[in-house]
């Protein structure tokens, strides 16, 4: 599971018993004809990157993407130069167009966070695009590997389009301090001062292997399609 703790501004990986670890070496059972997919986090998984994090200010990606390997990721708005697999300080990313609102927002990272995770929304019975606010000193499971496995198994039986649509569940968007969506003035995440997008490697790998065995639904392609 991928869990976010707003009090410490950290991500944690937990198993079903709440133990902080990431042993997902079991095989993924899917219908005959579709290759068995192994989770990349087998022996030596701590040497693997489990996610790629991109940082944005409004609609502009700032700096290089950061691949992470640690089971705990800390993100703050300060200037620690040691960017590595366990900590990201957003103050290090330069932007000549940064305005006062963005500067002020970065100083308050940790007060509240807003998360859009289709996996989390599925678990809780929310609309797929729901944005959830995680208040200070609260935490929330925002991705469940077993739920994704089950959904991928089901979608692989229903064909290419159903499976391909699951790619929307393999990334998570998260804004700091400022929310977006139907209940807020900002309708899109690209209108928030600073936010990140997390791409989860293992689900993307499983999905890629399943899609590789399928043929896309035939559709006419034209200049206006």
Image (cartoon, helix red, strand yellow):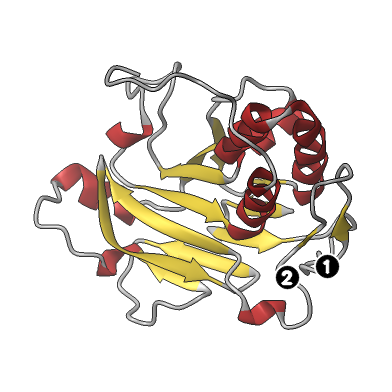
Give the answer, above or below, for where 121 lies relative to 147: above
Which residue matches tag 2? 41
Which residue matches tag 1? 25
Residue drawn at (45%, 78%), measured in percent from left and top?
84
Give the answer, above or below, for where 151 lies relative to 187: below
Q: Is residue 180 left or right of residue 139?
A: left
**Label 1: which secondary element:** loop
Q: Position of residue 87 (x, y in %)?
A: 47, 72
Depth order, front residue of 113/208: 208
What label sits on residue 110 in the rendered view? none
Q: CA distance from mark 1 to mark 2?
A: 6 Å
From this viewpoint, is residue 117 visible?
no
Q: Position of residue 1 (x, y in %)?
A: 74, 53
Q: Position of residue 213 (x, y in %)?
A: 70, 46
**Label 2: which secondary element:** loop
Q: Quadrant of the C terminus?
A: top left
């Amino acid at each position: 599971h991928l869990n976010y703790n707003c009090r410490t501004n950290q991500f944690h990986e937990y198993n079903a018993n709440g133990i902080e670890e990431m042993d997902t070496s079991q095989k993924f059972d899917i219908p005959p004809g579709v290759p068995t997919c192994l989770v990349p986090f087998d022996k030596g998984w701590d040497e693997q990157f489990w996610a790629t994090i991109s940082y944005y200010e409004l609609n502009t990606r700032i700096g290089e993407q950061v691949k992470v390997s640690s089971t705990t990721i800390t993100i703050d708005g300060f200037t620690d130069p040691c960017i590595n697999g366990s900590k990201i300080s957003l103050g290090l990313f330069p932007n000549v167009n940064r305005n006062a609102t963005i500067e002020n927002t970065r100083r308050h990272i940790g007060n509240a966070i807003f998360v859009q995770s289709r996996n989390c929304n599925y678990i809780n019975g929310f609309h797929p695009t729901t944005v959830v606010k995680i208040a200070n000193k609260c935490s929330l499971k925002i991705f469940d590997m077993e739920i994704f496995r089950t959904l991928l198994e089901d979608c692989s039986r229903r064909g290419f389009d159903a499976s391909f649509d699951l790619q929307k569940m393999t990334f998570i968007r998260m804004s700091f301090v400022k929310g977006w969506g139907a209940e807020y003035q900002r309708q899109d995440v690209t209108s928030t001062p600073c936010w990140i997008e997390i791409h989860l490697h293992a689900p993307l790998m499983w999905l890629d292997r399943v899609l590789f065995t399928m043929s896309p639904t035939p559709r006419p392609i034209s200049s206006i399609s």
